[in-house]
Image (cartoon, helix red, strand yellow):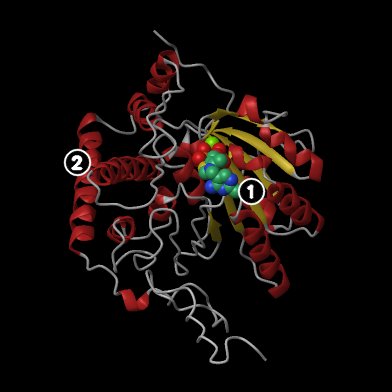
Amino acid sequence: MATRTPRKTTSRSTTTTRKKSASEPKVDKDQLIDFYRQMMDIRRFEERASRAYTQALVGGYCHLNLGEEAAVVGLMAALKPSDYLFTNYREHGYALARGIDPNRVMAELYGRDDGVSKGWGGSMHMFDFEARLLGGYGIVGGQIPLATGVALGIQYRGENDVVMCTMGDGTTNIGAFHESLNIAALWNLPCVFVIINNKLGMGTTVDKASAEPELYKRGAAYRMESERVDGLDPVAVYEAAQRAVASARDGKPFLLEVMTERLKGHSVVDPAKYRSAEEVEQLKLNDPVVTFGTKLKEDGVIDDELMSKIDDDAKKLAAESADFAANSPHPDVSTLFDYTYATPVPNDSRRLPGEPLFEPAPFPQNGGRA
Ligand SMILES: Cc1ncc(C[n+]2csc(CCOP(=O)(O)OP(=O)(O)O)c2C)c(N)n1
Ligand SMILES: [Mg+2]
């Protein structure tokens, strides 16, 4: 029987050391219960999404936040409503924690008109300016330069918001990661770069892909303060994210590494055969929804009755969102090109699927001679 390895709650980079001040806000009982509720909502939503995908109700790719719920909830709690968020393709949980209606999130997975991106984006490309969720990116690392650019925009306009940019562990080996961190540190941009370290980039482990597997240490190359935190504990994540966000708001970008688990395959269709039976057994002990629920019970914050009510409510919410999505209309094909560019592009082809790429040139009457 595997045992849960005790984790150090945080490790900090050598660039700066800072003691936790007594004035940092504590998390009260209501907020602890709210964290648990949000984590359970994401868990049940993702399970419902997975089912819908296997029933062919969802097209394209579908990557889930199963195992990352504590990370998502803790991070999002540290942002103001006007702060900006960029994520990768593993984004449903972020959309929910950012306060977007689960019906709209599920409708996007179903490719329907009521979806977050009006059904044209799908699982990987949700965008909601009101919630300041600026995507959803399928290209590994594609979000990092864009997030850095938005941070530059905030600084240029003298605003007080910050940008949080989440990415996977595998993403830290993409050139754009290094270019963006370098420029953000050089120009003091208000950006928090968050590595969600689930220990796998598809099927490749961090140890096999990264010469420095303690990824938060990469901040040192850019004299950027950085920290590693236990991503199974939403409170630890929340407190670390608060420090990171405060630093960024003060013009000092921050690199935060959140140690999580990916409970299932890379995407819904991946059976994850590359994982050993022992590893899979260990995962059960590192399930954040279970471990956080147990801790709240032991601490007397929550009882069995409230726990099952929260679970029932979450299942109901997920089922309702699936019904809503199934009943939402498909987008009209005439809107296919409406949301591709923010401003018109002169040579933008408005060709519908199946139409010829170019109009055939007329055959020259004189046989092609001048
Ligand atoms: C530029 C680019 N290269 C490769 C891929 C294929 N790909 C999709 S996800 C992925 C792994 C990324 O792993 P990680 O950054 O750890 O994120 P996770 O899936 O674990 O959340 C790869 C290689 C891609 N989408 N984009
Ligand atoms: Mg990963």
- Residue 25 seen in the figure: no
Q: Which mark is residue 312?
A: 2
Report which residue position mark 1 lands on.
Answer: 193
The structure residue drawn at horizontal position 40% and vertical position 50%, both measured from the top left corner, is 92
Determine whether the residue tagged by mark 1 lies in a helix, strand or loop.
strand
Horizontal relation, residue 243 to residue 109: left or right: right
Disc nearest the viewer among 2 and 1: 1
Q: Secondary structure at mark 2?
A: helix
Residue type indicated by callout 2: Asp
The quarter of the image holding the N terminus is top left
Ligand 2, seen in the image, is in the quarter at top right
The alpha-carbon separation of the residues under discs 2 and 1 comes to 35 Å
Residue type at the position of mark 1: Phe
Observer-nearest residue: 33 or 124? 124
Could you tell me which residue is drawn at 51 percent across and 46 percent down?
Answer: 75
Residue 114, how many percent across, how many down? 29, 67
Of all residues, the one furthest to the top in this rendering is 1
- Does the Cβ of the disc 1 residue fall within 8 Å of ligand 1? no
